[in-house]
Image (tube, rainbow, N blue to C red):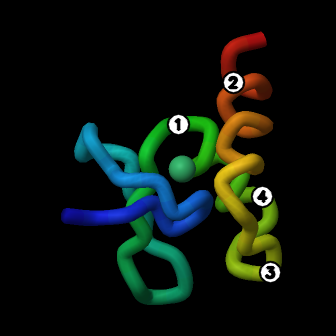
Amino acid sequence: MKYCDYCSLEVKIAGFKMNYKGSIKIFCCEGCKAIYTLFGDTHIVKNEEHDFAAKLMNR
Ligand SMILES: [Zn+2]
């Protein structure tokens, strides 16, 4: 089982991943991936942040 590198939720759909500073990061959704791209590992957060990411992408 894998967990989102941004919000720590379980990753159910593979495919949201990227290479960040030489290591592969995986995400649960496009929103988490987008925000991690913006803030990187300086902005590690809790599950509530996932909702923020989801809202951002669904607007
Ligand atoms: Zn996530």
Neighbor class of circle 3 (other Cα within 10 Å; few <14, some 14-19, many 20+) is few
Instruction: Identify residue type, mark 4.
Output: Leu
How far is the residue under mark 3 from the one under mark 2?
Answer: 21 Å
Q: In x, y percent, where is residue 40?
A: 71, 72
Q: Residue at x 80, y 72 (%)?
A: 43
Q: Residue at x 79, y 37 (%)?
A: 52
Viewer-nearest of labels 4 and 1? 1
Ligand 1 under 8 Å from disc 4 Cβ: no
Going from N to C along the chain, the mark reached first, 3 or 2, is 3
Residue under pointer 1: 30
Label 2 SS: helix
Labels 4 and 1 touching (C-beta < 8 A): no
Q: Which numbered disc covers residue 38?
A: 4
Residue under pointer 3: 42
Q: Which numbered disc covers residue 57?
A: 2
Going from N to C along the chain, the mark reached first, 1 or 3, is 1
Q: Residue at x 59, y 63 (%)?
A: 6
